[in-house]
Image: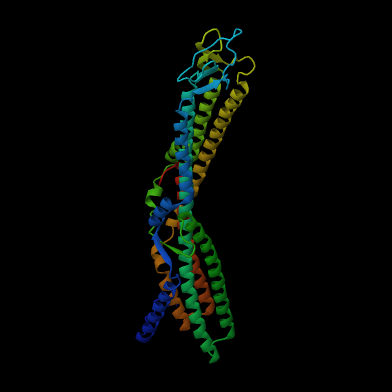
Amino acid sequence: METNTWHMPLQPTKRIIWTGLLLLLASTAAAQAPADTLRYSVQEAEKIFLQNNLLLLAEKLNIDQAEAHILQAKAWPNPSFTVDEVNLWATARQTGGAEVSPPFRNGWGKNQQFAMQLEQLVQTARKRQKSIQLEASSKTLAERSFTDLLYALRAEFRQTAAGLIYHQHLLQDLTLQQTLVTRLLDAQTAQYTLGNVPEAELVRLRALQFSLRAEINDMKATAGEEQQQLKTLMALEPERYLVLEDSEPHFSALRQLSLHALLRSAEEHNPALQTALAAIKMNEAAYALERSKRVPDLRFNMSYDRNGSTMLDFVGFGVAVDLPFFDRNKGNIRAASLQVRQSELAYRHKSSETGNSVAKTFADLQNALQAATAIDTAYLHRLDVLMQGLTLNFMQRNISLLEFLDFFTSFRENKQLYYQAVRSVATLKESLNYLTGSDL
């Protein structure tokens, strides 16, 4: 007849000892965090990230630069003023046919010649308006690029945060397990010296201790990399130690998602697609501007010439225009047309790539949700208690070492599988958020 030994009632003395051991394990886990620890919820950390991220602040300056370019494009060309034909000395001869001229003003300019000209460039074919449209399209592209970077960095931040929470859970469990195994090994070593425990059991327990220690070191290294990424994204000081507080996962809303709605959202809101669409608009504006340059601009001028012709004070008006015999801007127009076509093809490729990515990520998310919800969370919450009861039963010789190691490994793997499933759901959810330009 099989006997369930996991719920054997403990004697009062043993219960007191075991309670003290649990308190000691809890204090050991709490002492793992350094003194300069920063504890945030994921929402609080994300708020700091959005406020302090240096890449976002730098990218946002591109929008301000684009606004400055629009302001510059609205400015009219400056007129040009020319003074020439000036003789710096007065004509000495006043006879022999030389014409004597009176002073120009206040006694200056007697018997001297000079000319002045005022010229204004007037752009034709609405070049100024098309330049403004080009800069406005450039601003829209800068805004779309900022949004694309924002969504990409937000997805990276949330996925890295999910990874850090995952490794925090594992580190906490592994630390408790290592402490548990270490104290169990100490107790068995004392029994071994009394001849009550075979050496083989000590070797197996010591191997388990080494395995846990190596796994903890690897986990700390991975968590350290995620710490580095998050602190860089949040612009935190290097000496800070970041701890993210976990929240209970909610899967109900994710189960209601439909692939059709996600594809429609991606087509309308995907930041990379919107950036590619803005690039098309900007290239079309550049093409329109290059076409307008086929029409030459006009340069109107007004000139004054003193003592340079039969008239003492000559005032004349004129207009200048380039004759488009050799250069009709065909090369630049052709290049701009090809750039429009190139950006259209890039948009179609990005649209196809995005749709396929949404479909695959949606399928992966459904699988991850199925795996996460299939795990009995109530059972997981009892694993720590079960593991402690398992250890006590082994110390009381109610189970063998092989049974202890088998159940110990099974408990560890069950919790790790659950944490990994929750992390997969969070990671895939953020991938869908970026692909669809939403916040699911």
Q: Is residue 208 visible?
A: yes
At x 56%, y 9%, the residue is: 99
* Vertical order, 427 against 389 (above or below): above
Displayed quadrant of residue 203: bottom right
Q: Is residue 431 visible?
A: no
Outermost right residue: 326
At x 36%, y 83%, the residue is: 16
Displayed quadrant of residue 113: top right
The type of colouring in the image is: rainbow
Q: Percent x, y for residue 86?
A: 56, 20
Displayed quadrant of residue 106: top left
Outermost left residue: 12
Q: Nearer the viewer, residue 71 or 381?
A: 71
At x 58%, y 26%, the residue is: 336
At x 44%, y 80%, the residue is: 392
* Vertical order, 315 against 352 (above or below): above
Q: Percent x, y for residue 252?
A: 37, 51
Q: Nearer the viewer, residue 58 or 388?
A: 58
Q: How many marks?
A: 0
Image quadrant for the N terminus?
Answer: bottom left
Q: Percent x, y for residue 419?
A: 46, 61
Outermost bottom residue: 194
Q: Nearer the viewer, residue 94 or 62?
A: 94
Q: Percent x, y for residue 161?
A: 46, 57
Q: Nearer the viewer, residue 303 or 91?
A: 91
